Image: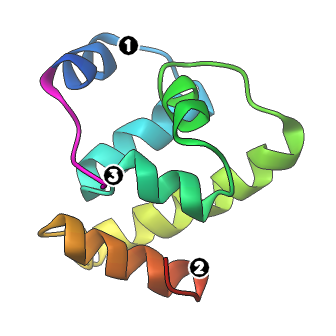
Amino acid sequence: MARFYGDKFLRELSANKSTHLGVQLGRACVAACIPATYVAIALDSSRMTVYSWFRGGGMREDKRKMVEAFLTILSTDTAEGVLPASSVKAAKKYIEGVIGRLI
């Protein structure tokens, strides 16, 4: 089951001053209240990989373009008030709308 982010992870992300794409993605997902489980589904990756990116870990070039596009969608929807998601259920529905299939 998906859940929102824990305090330890939020402290680590806040302390991380990196401009790495994965760290930017992590900040955007936290701000949008989109759990890592759903991010992993949307980006066709594992949850562990997504958390690695959030912490500044390496990212393959083929995933970089997908992450950039997803980050743009999150940023736009956050700016337009569509996000943050109000619950895990709302986050799931949002991701289903983005990827165009049920999860």
SS at badge 1: loop
Kindly identify which numbered label has been placed on residue 99. Answer: 2
Q: Residues within 10 Å of mark 3 (few under 14, many from 20)?
A: many
Amino acid residing under circle 2: Ile
Foreground residue, 15 or 36?
36
x, y percent for residue 86: 12, 69
x, y percent for residue 36: 41, 46
Amino acid residing under circle 3: Pro
Q: Residue at x 28, y 58 (%)?
A: 32
Q: Which tag, 2 or 3, sits closer to the chain's start?
A: 3
Over which residues does the magenta segment extend?
1-7
Q: Residue at x 56, y 60 (%)?
A: 41
Tell me, yes or no, whether the two marked residues, 2 and 3, touch with CB atoms within 8 Å.
no
In this figure, which residue is indicated by the disc labeled 3? 35
Asked if the magenta segment contains residue 35, the reply would be: no
- Dominant SS type (magenta): loop
Amino acid residing under circle 1: Asn
Foreground residue, 53 or 4?
4
Where residue 59 sits, quadrant-wise, is top right
Where residue 92 sits, quadrant-wise, is bottom left
- Reply above or below: 10 against 94: above
- Reply above or below: 100 against 103: below
x, y percent for residue 52: 56, 24
Tell me, yes or no, whether the two marked residues, 1 and 2, touch with CB atoms within 8 Å.
no
Q: Is residue 75 left or right of 34 when viewed as pictured?
A: right
In this figure, which residue is indicated by the disc labeled 1? 16
Q: Residues within 10 Å of mark 2 (few under 14, many from 20)?
A: few
SS at badge 2: helix
